[in-house]
Image (tube, helix red, strand yellow):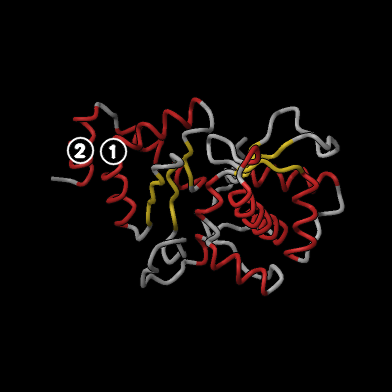
Amino acid sequence: MTLTQSLLDRLQPENLKLQRFQEIVARLFAWGIIVRDEDGVEQRCYDDACRIENLLVEYFALAGFRLIHDLQNEFFRLYAPGAQIPGMVEDDVDVVASLRARLSADFVAAALALRFLYQQGLVEGGSRLSDAGEILIRFDELATTLQTQIKRTLPDNLGDRERLLKDLKRHRLIQYSTLFSMQDEDALIAIRPTILGIISEDVLAAALEAEGQIEVTSEPDGSGEQA
């Protein structure tokens, strides 16, 4: 029996076609994450992925990848071979450099600041913590935390700042409304629980000690753009 036929046999009881399996795999390879609380398309991808979770785990494992399912926050995250996974024992596979996401220094610093704010928000609780486990912040809180904790500043150019926020949103680390404006002091950014999947407490502590000079855990690299 071929691998393809075996795959088809595993999909058949769930009434899923090979094309749908390929769509889910392609999304994970491209973006490294599927979050149910994103949009209708991603919600359906997540639900279908849940139906064939064991099959997906086995499939990616064949190539050395690890697929992690966060049941509480309802998302799948795919880690490249050798990637450090918060809360899990490291494997013995060497990191494959070409599979590491090409993340800018500004992205890494912002992600670390978001992780700090997320932890702080969990401790404070109250209105900052949403029912979905998100921590609500204002844009100026991100800028201040970058300066005081990570010892970096946001990009000077407004366009670069907007691109940075879009990158953080594309990686499913934050979300904000379509009417969001950095100039609006009351506008809120939601830090998603997915931040815990790339920055552990140990990594954050090391980054604070090193003033932000540390690399965020890699994800499979995508070349496209996703809202």
Query: If the image is split into quadrants, where does the N terminus sit?
Result: top left
Q: Work out how far the residue at label 2 is from the one at label 1, CA to CA, in angstroms.
A: 8 Å
Looking at the rendered image, the disc whose residue lies closer to the viewer, 2 or 1, is 1
Query: If the image is split into quadrants, where does the C terminus sit?
Result: top right
What's the amino acid at mark 2? Arg
User: Going 72% across and 58% down the picture, which residue do you hit?
Assistant: 106
Disc 2 is placed on an element classified as helix
- The residue singled out by tag 1 in the image is 52
Describe residue 107's horizontal placement relative to residue 88 as left or right.
Answer: right
Residue 17 vertical position relative to residue 167 in the rendered view, above or below: above
Nearer the N terminus, badge 2 or badge 1? Answer: 2
- Counting labels gives 2
- The residue singled out by tag 2 in the image is 10
Relative depth, front residue between 63 and 126 = 126
Q: Are marks 2 and 1 in contact (CB under 8 Å)?
A: yes
What's the amino acid at mark 1? Ile
